[in-house]
Image: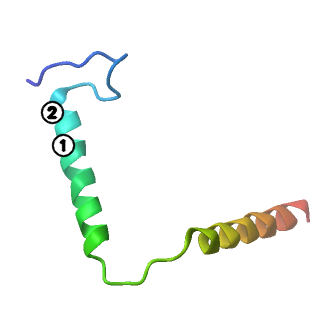
């Protein structure tokens, strides 16, 4: 059994869960850095998301 962690200090219940998440997260970062596709500028992504949100609101308003 893994060592329990203090909920005030960690969002994970055990050290095993924390270590597992750390391995998963680090692999995602490595995969992202190795991705050959071009990056998308932050401003472009934000503009697209603002338009998507506006369209959803228009649709919801009827």
| Residue 35 placement, left or right of 42 | left
Which residue does the image show at 27% across and 25% down from the upper left? 13
Q: Residue at the bottom extreme?
A: 37
Extreme residue in the left direction:
1
Drawn side of residue 13 relative to residue 1, left or right: right
* Quadrant of the frame with the C terminus: bottom right
Colour setting: rainbow
Q: What is the quadrant of residue 50 in the picture?
A: bottom right
Give the crowd class for mark 1: few <14, some 14-19, many >=20 residues within 10 Å: few
Q: Position of residue 53 (x, y in %)?
A: 74, 63
Do residues under tags 2 and 1 come within 8 Å of each other at their CB atoms?
yes
Q: Residue at x 30, y 77 (%)?
A: 35
Q: Secondary structure at mark 1?
A: helix
Which residue appears at 29% of the width and 70% of the height? 33
Observer-nearest residue: 29 or 60? 29
Image spot of residue 4 (x, y percent): 19, 18
In the image, residue 54 lies at what x, y percent? 80, 66
Q: In the rendering, which numbered label is found on residue 36?
A: none
Q: Residue 20's mark?
A: 1
Count of numbered labels shown in the rendering:
2
Q: Secondary structure at mark 2?
A: helix
Query: Within 10 angstroms of label 2, few (less than 14), some, or many (20 or more) residues?
Result: some
Look at mark 2 in the image and give the residue it sits on: 16
Q: Label 2 to label 1, Cα distance in Å?
A: 6 Å
Q: Position of residue 10 (x, y in %)?
A: 32, 25
In the visual, does 18 lie left or right of 61?
left
Residue found at x 24% / y 44%: 21
Which quarter of the figure is the N terminus placed in?
top left
* Camera-side residue of 1 and 31: 31
Q: Is residue 7 above or below residue 37?
A: above
* Left-right relation of 43 to 5: right
């Amino acid at each position: 059994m893994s060592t329990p962690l203090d909920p005030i200090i960690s969002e994970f219940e055990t050290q095993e869960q924390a270590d597992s998440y750390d391995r998963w997260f680090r692999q995602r970062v490595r995969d992202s850095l190795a991705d050959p596709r071009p990056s998308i500028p932050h401003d472009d992504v934000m503009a697209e998301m603002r338009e998507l949100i506006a369209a959803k609101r228009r649709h919801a308003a009827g």
